[in-house]
Image (cartoon, rainbow, N blue to C red):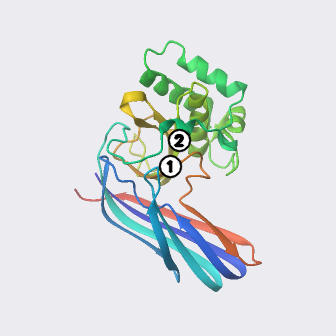
Amino acid sequence: MIVSVSHRTVYRYDAPLRLAVQSLRLTPSQFDGQKVLSWEISVEGGIRGGAFRDGAGDWIESWSVRGPTDRVEVAVTGTVDTTDLAGMVRGHRETVHPLVYLRETPATRIDTALAELAAGAARGATSLLDTCHALSNAVREAIAYRPGVTGAHTSAAESLALGEGVCQDHAHALIAAARSLDIPGRYVSGYLLADQDGKEHEAAHAWAELWVGELGWIGFDPANACCPNDLYIRIGSGFSAQDAAPIRGIASGPGAEALDVTVAVTAGQQ
């Protein structure tokens, strides 16, 4: 499928900035499930710095904006040819060992409720893959999708206790539940054209990938009860949402920051 993306992020400040420095993880991953046809990243008034591919296979580039300025705008446009691999991240070149993703973070800390959820889901599973599917289904059933009830720093344990959350919370909870069974898991950021019923969906999306032995990394999206398919564009990964954030940086100045994000994902012609 041909999928086009237009993603615009604007930071506004109520007092001029002296300097802003950003690290951008906004380039689609290179693997058998997607081929980049065109992709452009620009920062209004920005100076492009160094770029590199990290050990997880993500492309990261730096930008700086020198002030005085009261706004920083990051724009992404591009088109990707996607293929449904049933969630498999086949052909993705990376050097980080999967066991590294057993590391705990504040967002994915395991508590008794998460461990019990995982143990109950795994009971009766006949294979590692079956266990991973069961974990994803259990997280979906335990955390209802409801925007606005959780925040950027809500942990997996907190969203499970609340019983509500968004895709970020689903991903964190699945990673924590998997890790309680010694299954490595990581957070993935990207874009989503639509859900399985073809309805409009939040275009900026997140899900989790679990290490399934010889099958390698496989994506699971509890929010939509599926594995990522050709409706998804994979951008980057990390231990948690904070680690995998598409835009990270610092701003030097006294002003308070306001953020405005617009994302449009559309299907193009084959």
* Mark toward the start of the polypeptide (1 vs 2): 2
Residue visible at 43% across and 35% down in the picture: 226
Measured from the top left, where is residue 1 in percent x and y? Answer: 28, 51
Residue 135 lies, in percent from the top left, at: 53, 26
Is 86 above or below relative to 205?
Answer: above
Q: In this view, which residue lies farthest toward the right? A: 254
Q: Say above or below: 211 vs 1.
A: above
Please, what secondary structure does the residue beneath circle 2 have? strand
Q: Quadrant of residue 10?
A: bottom right
Q: Residue furthest toward the bottom?
A: 68
The residue where tag 2 is placed is 186
Instruction: Return the x and y of residue 145 as percentages of the image width and height.
Output: 59, 40
Q: State whether residue 202 appears in this view.
A: no
Identify the residue under disc 1: 237
Quarter of the picture holding the C terminus: bottom left
In the displayed image of the protein, which residue is found farthest to the left?
Answer: 270
Q: Amino acid at mark 1?
A: Ser
State the residue at coordinates (43%, 29%): 212
**Mark 1 touching mark 2, by CB under 8 A?**
yes
